[in-house]
Amino acid sequence: MKYSVLIIAALLIAAACIAGCAQQPSSTQESSAALQDAIKIGVIASLTGPASNVGTNMWQSAQIAADKINAAGGVTLKDGTTRQVRLIVGDDESTQAGGQKAATKLITDDKVDILVGGYSSAVTSAYQQIIAEYKVPYIVTGASSPIITHRTDIDTSYVFHHCPTTDTYGEYTTTFIDEVVRAAVNKKLGAASDRPFRLAVLYQDTAFGKGVQTAVGNTITKKNLNIELVSLQSFKMGESDFRTQLTAIKAAKPDAVYIAAFPNEGAPAIVQARRDIGLNTIFLNVENNDNSQFYKDLGQYGEYAIIESRFSPYIAPAGAVAAAQDDFKQAYYKKFGTYPDMMGASTYEGVFIATEGIKSAGTTDKTAVREALTTLKMPQVIEAMKDSTISFSSDFRESSFDLWMEQLHMDAAAGETRPKIIWPDNLKTTEFVLPSWYEAGSSA
Amino acid sequence: MDDISIILQILFWGLYAGCIYILLATGLNLIFGVMKVVNFAHGEFLMVGAYITFTVFLFTGLNPYVILLLSMLALVGIGAIVERLCFRPILGTGKLNEIFLSIGLIYIFQNGAAMIWGDAWQSVKSPYDGITVPVGPLSVPLDYIIIIVVTALILCGLYLFLKKTTIGMQMRATSQNRKGAMLVGINVERIDVISFGLGCALAAAAGTLWVVSGQVFNPYMGAIPAVKAFAIIILGGLGSIPGAIIGGLLMGLAENGAAFLLGGIWKDAISFIVLIVVLVIRPTGLFGGKEG
């Protein structure tokens, strides 16, 4: 009996150890003496839970940025000292409670100088109170709901939003549907140009998903678009079975389906729609799905799906950022054996923005860094920005990206689909294609 | 798609979801019925079953429905080890010990799986992917028909095992009266190991069918199905195998009906609403006896 009790105790201790190993794969980037006096940047990412795929990509991308900054000599402050950058990760566990725990630990135990990261608006907004209380500058690079900096119930003045909001890309995608998809569908049907376009939205029931759904509705109203929302179906975060919602969508006879989901939700939703439900339509996806795992999970069912994007693991728009994107992808591949995704790209830039803010302030004093970030104007890093410059708007501290729409085409060599830019005209490499198997919602 | 077809389609998805729940809940009830232990880590056996299927498929390319047997066999072994090392020593020492032990097991299995396979979402493509068959007015993927048939076969096999074999009868005897079973010479500890292994094998079958149906999975996938399995066995009646079957089916149908009528966010909530309603009307569950 005693022997058995010992075994149980050993197993529980092993569980705790393994939990430590697996859930916190690396609590700090390095711990050498050279980094003891370093600038401490806290990275909040989902290393475990439903968003772990994207979260891991964010954390690894931050490491590539820190490596590059340190290799270039570090950050020189006003007092003439040059300091290295040290990253400390906080795993939000893809949950609100996990996010609160991670933010509190990074701020109070690790005493970070600045924070970067944050994925899932629901999770990020849950720990913003802690950021407001301790007044730590935070560059949010993943959570895309505008509430992150628009909310008025707490002080958000230390929060800077470096990723397009659901308002921005929801409007962008809806405009694309109206200008491009509608015309192609009407042409295929031989329908009059005033035929209402039938759009369905499948959205995650969180601030992120609801934000996209609201943006679509607002855009239709604001621009007076001839788009009819025929079905609005929600699902809970982390869902893997969408068949019932997709059946309801099919019954509503849509011309296209806009999916506001994470990659681990969006890919099975499209596979189930095409394979199980026979919903042969165009699926439009939010930018966070431009992730190598998404392409892998989609397989052939992803063919002709569309992603609104600003950074892709597989293509880069022609122009000033192409070479920088390639450098980043190669460095990432060399270190981790995979390709970075979009949230990784903005987090990579987030670390550069953080260090630029500290450099401009000449100190790690949090109030001074906040002031420096407010007036920051730095050249774009790897993603195409408006006016080729990273800066934050004076009202809600949001940066502005150049977006594009891409369509997925089967790549026989890869055995998966690969994206091609189809919109806007100055970036597109090919035209939008309405596949032969496409079925419009109604014939006229 | 007319209204009847839509309703039939939703019922079909409910039936499919019910199959996964039935296997998971039947396994859990088998263990509870014989050992009276509360194992919150039961969903982790579903997860391990999914990963075994994934791994064997990745390395051998075998038909996943064949791997189902391997997965079940592997989980019989894993279940027997867990029972012997973890649950047997604390049997009868109080429910709190069982609860904390099973919570510890959740961490061990989840983090162990994350270390071995990583925590990225994975999926497996069935060899019958893309094949549909007509069922009345519906055209449904062949995989779902196979899943329903496989579930029915497993349940028939379990029924025959419990009714016709000596070990099955000993399991039923132990479930009905543990002390009485000991008095008539049944080695109840041996029965415990077999029951636990068999319960885990049923969870493994659920995991394999989950994978084959094209749903994504990761090391943390077992938590929600386990909670639902508990709701199902309470709904059906603790220790009752028919209760687990009816409860699982009811849950699958209720979830998909709620997702269609009320929206996807009600999918999980409806399980517990049904549970509360049933318990208010019949506190012992649908098939529960006095002890339930």
Image (cartoon, coloured by chain):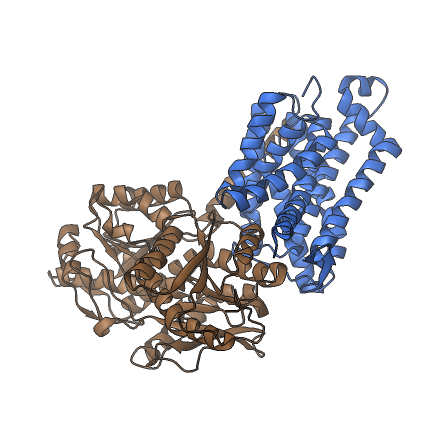
Q: Colour of chain B?
A: blue
Q: Residue at x 54, y 32 (%)?
A: B273
Front-most of residues A76 and A56: A56
Q: Is residue A135 above or below residue A59?
A: above
Q: In this rendering, does residue B59 appear at all?
A: yes
* Relative image position of residue A243 (x, y in whole percent): 58, 53
Q: Is residue A301 above or below residue B264?
A: below
Q: Colour of chain A?
A: brown
* Relative image position of residue B109 (x, y in whole percent): 58, 44
- Which residue in the rendered view is the most extreme toward the left? A79
- Judge from the rendering whether residue B261 lies leftward or rightward of residue A384; answer left or right: right
Q: In this rendering, does residue A38 appear at all?
A: no
Q: Is residue A77 above or below residue B100?
A: below
Q: Quadrant of residue A58?
A: bottom left
* Relative image position of residue A12 (x, y in whole percent): 55, 36
- Judge from the rendering whether residue A245 lies leftward or rightward of residue B194; answer left or right: left
The N terminus of chain A lies in quadrant: top right
- Judge from the rendering whether residue A383 lies leftward or rightward of residue A26; answer left or right: left
* Relative image position of residue B149 (x, y in whole percent): 77, 49
Front-most of residues B275 and A96: B275
Q: Is residue A104 above or below residue B188?
A: below
Q: Residue at x 80, y 29 (%)?
A: B171
Front-most of residues A240 and B40: A240
Q: Residue at x 46, y 45 (%)?
A: A20
Q: Quadrant of residue B247?
A: top right
Q: Residue at x 74, y 62 (%)?
A: B62
